[in-house]
Image (tube, rainbow, N blue to C red):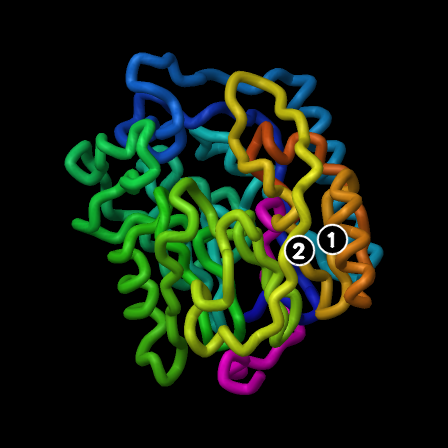
Amino acid sequence: MDEWSKVKKVVIGTANQAMYPDGDCVGVRNVYYSDLHHDHLIPHGHYSQTIIDECNEDLENLANVYKTFGAEVLRSNSTQFTNCHSFVSPRDNITTIGNFVIASPMSINSRKNEWKNIPVKVTHNLTDSRFNENDYVDDCIMNKKFLATQNYKPMWDAANVLRAGRNILYLISNTGNLAGAHQLQEILGPKTEFKVHVLRDVYSYQHIDTTIALLEPGVVFANPSRIKSKAQLPKPMQNWDIIFAPEPTVQKWYGKHCMASPWVNVNLVNLDEKTKIVEKDQIDTIKLLEKHKYTVIPVQMKHSRSFGAGPHCATLEVERECMLEWFFDKV
């Protein structure tokens, strides 16, 4: 699986029963609210029904874009196992690499069962290991120099991963420790089959997809506030072309806490190598991609920052028309 070949089957999320991450769960403050002081009350409870309904409307429209493109669309409508807003973002929980469909161990306990609501057949369930208070780093609160998790055991969300054929990018952040990268490499087998490339010291907060998007073999779309040069990319990727994203149109967020970076314009998703889905308010991003001869389909995602879910987060490809090739070496 890669990030850019023509999509044939996709899971799209739902906002039903969306709630803030369970504040009583160990590690939630460290992973999700490290930007809030210790004495600051963290959000709890469900999102308002108005926000949920508006998000579901946008997700339905996104599903229709895929259907019009000819893709089979699966919906994760069950919310039996929820302590979070995550069903908006099925990509948080599962990654598909080659013949592997991996339910990641996640970075907090309350999200470990969410994959059960996603209508795909998992080949590797990594959610059995439980986390305790010793697995988290309290120094991360109000200090981005420290990440939220220790390295005692694999702790990682699937959304820390991007796929370039047999080469896999893995972001070290609050939601992905180095032990997680090693676990993923062990599952995928020898580096001659798949190779996990680690991105360090790029973005401390959460997932990879407001930092980098892979547009097609040989082309990276990058957040210039985090990726300053190709030297930060894995060495075999440093001969790729890089398009730096323009400043995002800063979207409003609704509710008790902003759950996403302003850089939701990087959180785009590919229908194929030349067709991109981008949040419709990101006009400068749309113009830049069109300048580079990409076809852009704008979609409204009013609550990208309320839920932490742009077009890439809200979709999980089950099948693309792709060959597993060593794209880093070829291009």
Q: Position of residue 214 (x, y in %)?
A: 60, 64
Residue wearing tag 1? 277
Q: Which residues are magenta?
A: 312-331
Q: Position of residue 313 (x, y in %)?
A: 58, 46
Q: Does any portion of residue 319 appear in the rendered image?
A: no
Q: Which image quadrant for residue 320? A: bottom right
The answer to whether mark 2 and mark 1 are in CB contact below 8 A is yes
Q: Position of residue 46 (x, y in %)?
A: 52, 18
Quarter of the picture containing the N terminus is bottom right
**Seen in the image, is 210 located left or right of residue 200?**
right
Residue wearing tag 2? 269
Neighbourhood count class around disc 1 (C-alpha, 10 Å): few under 14, some 14–19, many 20 upward: many
**Seen in the image, is 163 located left or right of residue 297?**
left
- Residue drawn where x is 53% and y is 51% of the image: 211
Relative height, residue 266 to residue 243 (above, below):
above
The kind of secondary structure element at disc 2 is strand
- Residue drawn where x is 51% and y is 36% of the image: 86
Label 2 vs label 1: CA separation?
Answer: 5 Å
